[in-house]
Amino acid sequence: MNKTHFTKHLGGACLSLMMLASTSCKVKNETKKEPTKKPNILLIYTDDLGYGDVSCYGGKVLKTPNIDNIAEEGIRFTSGYCASATCTPARYSMLTGAYPWKNKKAEILAGNAPLLIDTTWTTLPKMLQHQGYHTGVIGKWHLGLGNGSVDWNKEVEPGPRAVGFTDEYIMAATNDRVPCVFINNGHVDHLDPNDPIQVDYQKNFEGQPTGKNNPEMLKLRTTQGHDQSIVNGISRIGFMKGGKSALWKDENMADLFLNKAKQFLTNHKEEPFFLYYALHEPHVPRVPHPRFVGKSGLGARGDAILEADWCVGEIMKHLKSLGLDENTIVIFSSDNGPVTDDGYADKADELLGDHKPLGPLRGGKYSLLDGGTRVPFMVRWTNHIKPGVSDALVTQTDFLASFAHLLGVKDVNLRDSKNTMDTFLGKNNKGRDEFVFEALGHKTGLRKGDYIFIPPYEGGHYIEWGVMNETGNGKVDRLYNIKEDIGQAKNLAEEKPELLKEMKARYQELVKGYK
């Protein structure tokens, strides 16, 4: 009813009352405090990306402007760590807040391994889900599926949804392992029921070619292992048969995951969300889209990193286009350090040139040395974080405790997770006091303050493949001042016996009962 109609029937007195009420409501609305909206969380997680692979960490050859932009608009941590120098344990720790070396099953999993995470545990996504967040994982999973005997032609459970994710669009394990299909909320995407999938990690299926026996069928040769079932002209780890309509094409994987991630943001722009966007680059086999082939000058590995950087730029553009930029905490990191030759003949070693994937660090993927677990790590929250660089010790294991603190969540089993949210937000430079990191085979060391302690371990000086991957194993105790000697060139064990004794005692106290 308009004012004229209202006045005609009820008179001027009623009109005055209406105007007064309207004025009162207007004042009330202007003074009312709107509830603070919970921040969205976008976790961008790369695979095998090294400290020196990102130009804002000092890389001179490869340029990663989109990743750099996150650092420029947020905090770039120079001492950011994943929990393990291999992927499954690092991802396990990141989602659960638990040290992976406390779980002997937390190792590099086969593609048909059962779900590694206890479904009764509070995880990062489950905690956020209980706080009203819509949670999604898109990309690489590699934390196991099912209970040990998966029928890929039926619903695949338990999986991400059992540990707190509302939506999932994932590869089961890695891009070098079967099954080479995508799982869409528990079901193999585009599966023809008349062409069922079979997977076996012990023996091949009759009549199925392999990379070992049929190298003429390969478009990418192998250097070690990876010589079993052939999918898309590339041989993998494990044996697979069937599911032809569901098989992935490596060249299109980045675009597919990106589009799924963008769709997730669009679908849930009106509610708090947590998106774990797990890129597969630059993990082997490195088969970037033709748009990126030859662009880096460093071969397939460099091209894959440029593709990953482009994906980061595209998801950030989409975030901004939806008006979500200012209320979204963006975290960028990697699951472990870099590796060059990791099983395929893509000339990653030969074409390195002046590029140094480790930057100033030593070690790499699988290694006890710092390059195994010290990774690119940055946090951005527009209008909440003052851009800068921090030397504080921060870890992915601490996401659970930190976000629980931010959201005021109590009575959560945080396991080994520590609240360092104020450091993530740039309010202080404290970070963690100490952290037990892990390498291949549950070998561990301790970082405490500016020092790293590594106990003796048997094994070779270098991993048997690649040109840069030192195991970090040795016959004596090692002590490094990581602030003065970032490349871990000088063992201070004999020079600082009292500090060595202190570090060793603390390490043994922390790992007691697990070693």
Image: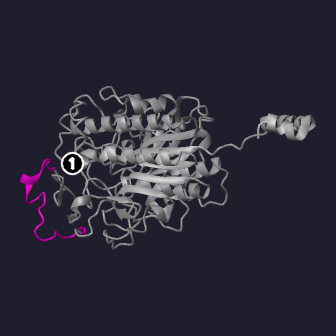
Q: Residue furthest top?
A: 60
Instruction: Where is residue 481? Give x, y as percent.
Output: 46, 37
Q: What kind of residue is marked 1?
A: Trp
Q: Which corner quadrant holds the N terminus?
A: top right
Residue 417 appearing in the image: yes
User: Which of the two residues, 80 or 118, is positioned nearer the viewer here?
Assistant: 118
Q: Quadrant of residue 293?
A: top left
In this picture, is 83 found above or below 480? below
* Residue 28 in the figure: left or right of residue 406: right
- Neighbor class of circle 1 (other Cα within 10 Å; few <14, some 14-19, many 20+) is some
Name the residue: 15% across, 50% down. Answer: 222
Q: Residue furthest left?
A: 216
Residue that mark 1 sits on: 465
Residue bounds of the magenta highlight:
196-222
In this picture, is 165 found above or below 253? below
Q: Is residue 358 magenta?
A: no
Q: Which corner quadrant holds the C terminus?
A: bottom left
* Magenta-colored segment: predominant secondary structure: loop
Q: How is the image coloured?
A: one colour
Q: Quadrant of residue 108?
A: bottom left
Q: Secondary structure at mark 1?
A: loop
Name the residue: 38% across, 45% down. Answer: 259
In this picture, is 389 found above or below 175? above
* Residue 364 in the figure: left or right of residue 504: left
In this picture, is 450 found above or below 509? above
Residue 432 appearing in the image: no
